Image (cartoon, helix red, strand yellow):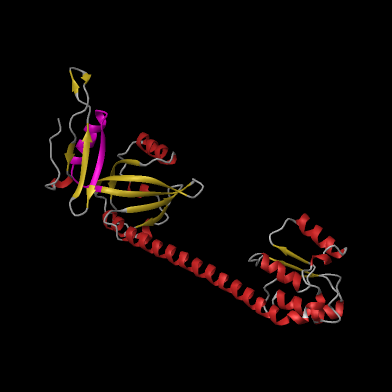
Amino acid sequence: METARVHRPDLIISDALMPEMDGFEFLHAVKSDKELGSIPVVIHTSVYTGMNDEELVLRLGAEAFIPKPVKPEAFWAEISAVLEGGGAGRRVTPPTAMATEEMKYFREHCGIVAAKLEEKVRELEESLARRKEAEETLVKLSQAVEQSPTAIVITDKEGTIEFVNPKFVQISGYTQEEALGENPRILKSGETSKEEYRSLWETILSGSVWLGLFHNRRKSGELFWEAATISPIMNREGEITNFIAKEVGYGTGLGLAIVYGIVKQHGGFITICSKLGEGTAFTILLTLVEGGEKKGSPPPTVIIPGGRRPSSWPMTMPR
């Protein structure tokens, strides 16, 4: 108010909600002031509940009410009209009637401000609730990965390890500190061909899930077979940002390796099923060959590494 008295502006543009005096109260004070009452006032705000706001602003003497957002050309057209006197005729009640409506003004003013504050509080509460829910989901996911009974490795797009869970540490012999920043090739035994690695990368870079066997080497030098899936992780734009590798079965026996070699040689494939507390089963599908011609597929063959066979799973010998 004092600044306006000193500089006597040609136009005052005010928001509705401000720290010390909101726009409604400020407008009432300006239009009630003998020295400042003739200065045009425009209320420009994003805090807008409806036509009641505009009616109250104009009744209090404002030359214009411009809600945000507004295109620049429309905004300047409204301002030009006010400066040229085009906005004065928009008042609902003449300024001279302000004194008689002062009590009514304060009631309406308080009601509008209270509605604004309640709306802001609701928005804040909803935002906090969504954030809390998201944080709880992240905690659950983090705990699930940390406590997973299978080894999990997360790398960036180039294959640099960014995360390993405790099960990986147990199986590989590498600590988390030793694994982070390295490449999964620290487990490489040298027995997987370049063609297999090329196929792996082509599969995951295309957005598909790769499933296969590795003959890996622990930190101690001990070799072990590991069946694993490698899946791409994508952002909201569908771009690959990371890869996640999950172990689905491992062991040191040669049985699994022999079966894998036979399946690969005959053009078959392996599906894997895990049941908590019962172990992991590998379902082997081979093409049946009779007289040199392929005659379809035999029944699935289930192989249980280490000799464990849950009673609920049938066992058939390879043909």
Viewed as shown, does residue 264 lie left or right of 130?
left
Q: Residue at x 21, y 28 (%)?
A: 297
Q: Quadrant of residue 50?
A: bottom right
- Tell me the quadrant of the picture where the C terminus can be found: top left
Q: Tell me the quarter of the picture where residue 61 sits.
A: bottom right
Query: Is residue 260 magenta-colored?
Result: yes
Residue under the image location 32 percent in, 49 percent down: 246
Q: Is residue 220 above or below residue 139?
A: above
Q: Is residue 236 left or right of residue 53?
A: left
- Residue 20 visible in the shown view: no
Relative side of 223 to 158, left or right:
left
Q: Quadrant of residue 11?
A: bottom right
Q: Position of residue 128 (x, y in %)?
A: 49, 68
What's the residue at 21%, 39% (across, down)? 283
Which residue is depicted at the point 67% across and 73% down? 17
Q: Along the line of sight, which residue is nearer the eye, 301 or 252?
A: 301
Picture coordinates of residue 216 (x, y %)? 29, 46
Task: Report x, y in % for residue 180.
Answer: 40, 57
Q: Nearer the viewer, residue 300 or 148?
A: 300
